Amino acid sequence: MLRVIYLIFTEGYAASSGDDLLRPDLAEEAIRLARILHRSLPREREVAGLLALFLLTDARRAARVDAAGNQVLLEEQDRALWDADLIAEGRRLVVPALTGPGVGPYAVQAAIAALHDEAADFASTDWAQIVALYDVLLRIEPSPIVALNRAMAVAMRDGPEAGLALLDGLAGAAELRRYHLFPAARGDLLRRLGRTTEAAAAYRAALGLVGNRPERVTFERRLAELTGRDRLT
């Protein structure tokens, strides 16, 4: 049941297709269901972790798109728009979710979200602690997507070359072949390294896989910056 609710929230957080990045109706329904579960099972730490993850992530909703509905990346978001009440509630739930042996994956993801929300700005994010939490998450729930997210955190901690080396090591993973954020992540790190031609190729690959318009616009904008051309569409 937790997995199903998580998938509902994920689709609400970033729609797999369509003109809108966000599906608030789905995110709010997932939060509602998680609250019901938490009230019914207050001692279940992963239920608390799941609800905390939803609250800490959904708290950024107002800052994640601009007035035209285009995506605003985490490093560019106006953090004054984040919902302080949801962040405070989520942080309170993280503590019991992490307390005790056998911590679960939702609690760890919630802790990562809390570190993002606690940072005054993108530059002051505690990337070392985030990498350490991804290390834990990889041990308890190994997957190429978790490894991808860890690689990007390593890039923030140690530099883009370190992150790119980790991403290149994931290139053969079947789960990432149709996942648009894999080439997009490579494009971002290659761009930061000044490897313009390779970065442009990576963003073109991401454009071939992305399903929703706002993410497509983001990739097109990056590609235009790299090639010196106007946005493609």
Image (spheres, rainbow, N blue to C red):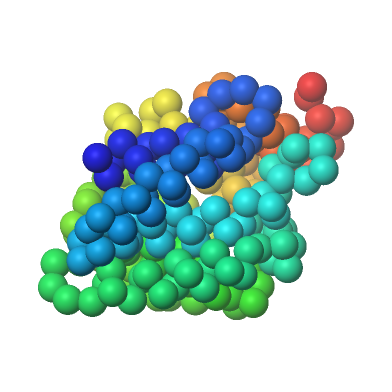
Instruction: Looking at this view, name the residue that lies furthest to the left.
Output: 101
Name the image quarter holding the C terminus. Answer: top right
Q: Residue at x 43, y 43 (%)?
A: 30
Name the image quarter holding the N terminus. Answer: top left
5 left or right, relative to 225: left
Query: Where's residue 148, x and y in %?
Result: 40, 49
Q: Residue at x 48, y 58 (%)?
A: 55
Query: Where's residue 49, x and y in %?
Result: 32, 61
Count of numbered circles in the view: 0
50 left or right, relative to 196: left
**Would you identify the image quadrant in which residue 150 lies?**
bottom left
Using the image as rendered, state which of residue 124 and residue 31 is in the foreground. Answer: 31
Query: Where's residue 129, x and y in %?
Result: 40, 75
Q: Is residue 129 visible?
A: yes
Q: Residue at x 22, y 51 (%)?
A: 141
197 left or right, relative to 225: left
Using the image as rendered, state which of residue 203 and residue 196 is in the foreground. Answer: 203
Q: Is residue 161 visible?
A: no
Is 179 drawn above or below residue 163 in the view shown? above
Query: Where's residue 24, x and y in %?
Result: 58, 40
**Would you identify the image quadrant in which residue 70 lies?**
top right
Is 218 drawn above or below residue 124 in the view shown? above
Using the image as rendered, state which of residue 35 and residue 117 is in the foreground. Answer: 35
Is 159 drawn above or below residue 177 in the view shown? below
Q: Residue at x 34, y 55 (%)?
A: 50
